[in-house]
Image (cartoon, rainbow, N blue to C red):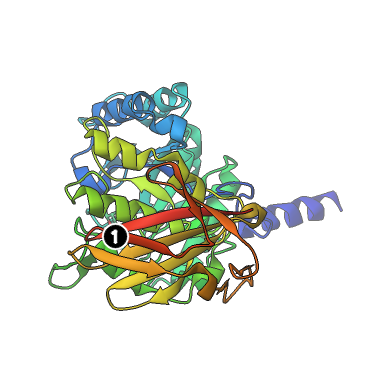
Amino acid sequence: MKRILVLIIALVFASGANAQKFEGLAETPPMGWNSWNKFACDVDENLIKETADAMVASGMKDAGYEYIVIDDCWHGERDSLGFIHPDPERFPSGIKALADYIHSKGLKFGIYSDAGWETCGGRPGSRGREYQDAMTYASWGVDYLKYDWCNTEGLKAEGAYLTMRDALYEAGRPIVFSICEWGDNDPWEWAGPIGHLWRTTGDIYNCFDCEEDHGTWSSWGVLQIIDMRPGIRTAAGPGHWNDPDMMEVGNGMSVSEDRAHFALWAIQAAPLIAGNDIRNMSPETVEILTNKDVIAIDQDTLGVQGYKHIDEEDYEVWVKPLAGGEVAVLFLNRTEDPMDITFDWKANKMTDPDFGHSYDYAADQYSIYNVHTHKKSGTTKKALKATIPGHDVLMYRLTKK
Ligand code: GLA
């Protein structure tokens, strides 16, 4: 009898039948930094340590940024038993020491792998080694895993991500699981019980309005990304977020474009993962990335992704319901020229098409707070008259009077 019981327990473990996603992580969209957008494969332990220092010194940690994630190319080789090791030249102290350093700063540590044989950068992937790699990451003190989708011929995305989810769970250390298959397999339909966030698009490119053609694939500007996946906002919520990719703020777009990019990510309840060199930031970049009023909209506990209330060729109005009956409203100018707008609140009852939250400015008056100037800006009694600079936004937080 005892033996049968042991066998049953062993089978349950082996099949991962009791495995699940770690709950209680990413209750608001994850915030942090990732090496890829700025440094690509040029990563080493000094860069990562200096970045952790800068996250504290710049005020980003105080503003809510938490995860320092090394993307592709940290890998060395597998040893004779199959255990993965970091590149010995770039990470001579080992990953555990790096994780300890990051933890000593009060931050969390993330790493990258791939569901296929090789990562997109040609390093060893986790295919067939999922449980072994998950154990290794847990032993290193990893808190976040970004799991990519290159070189996955013959794999089904849902199953492959489920395998790694179960492996992480069995390894026992709570790890945020970031799914990165670019939205190719409609992850918003299946990834909720598997990951905490999932990429919805191909890679971002450091431009506001462009497509960068790489031959067999493209990367995309800010406007292209926000246009790409209508109708998936109901998949997002506490613990499970749509991820329109890491940010390019501070990588060379204009201040207006960076401000708009950041605000558009916030109104979508997107993960706020900086992708610039945070050791060397202009004051404008620091101001954008640490704007606590914009961050509060992203991190709002209601966890509702915003929607478009007005969707014109050059001009959009986005609405994000917030906890406590408040609401964020964003006006986007998609053109390069300044745009004068008049917006009659009373004629613009806003009703969330999916969740039903409703704001009727003809019936109720709201006070308006500008999250970029950090100033009160009247009420909804009077129509808003304003000019939006080219490739920029106006963003407000409204509170019922
Ligand atoms: C893919 C991902 C990127 C990055 C690179 C690394 O393109 O989408 O975010 O991780 O791989 O090679």
For residue 314, what is the image quadrant? bottom left
Report the residue at 25% width, 42% height from top. Answer: 276
Furthest residue to the front? 382
Q: Is residue 93 left or right of residue 215?
A: right
Report the residue at 59% width, 75% height from top. Answer: 354
Q: Is residue 152 visible?
A: no
Report the residue at 52% width, 48% height from top. Answer: 299
From the viewer's side, name the closer residue of 107 and 46: 107
Residue 125, position in %: x, y? 33, 54
Residue 221, position in %: x, y? 23, 63
The amino acid on which the numbered mark 1 sits, given as a three-letter code, is Thr
Q: Against 44, is 336 above or below?
A: below
For residue 225, what is the image quadrant? bottom left
From the viewer's side, name the closer residue of 253 and 111: 253
> What is the tally of numbered marks visible in this picture?
1
Q: Is residue 31 left or right of residue 240?
A: left
Q: Against 383, is 259 above or below?
A: above
Residue 114, position in %: x, y? 36, 56
Q: Is residue 363 left or right of residue 52?
A: right
State yes or no: Cβ of the residue under disc 1 lies below 8 Å from any atom of ligand 1. no
Furthest residue to the right? 1
The quarter of the image that holds ligand 1 is bottom left
Looking at the rendered structure, the secondary structure element under dot 1 is strand
From the viewer's side, name the closer residue of 72 and 302: 302
Q: Is residue 177 visible?
A: yes
Q: Which residue is mark 1?
A: 387
Report the residue at 27% width, 39% height from top. Answer: 285
From the viewer's side, name the closer residue of 172 and 276: 276
Residues packed near mark 1 inside 10 Å, few (<14), some (14 to 19) or many (20 plus): some
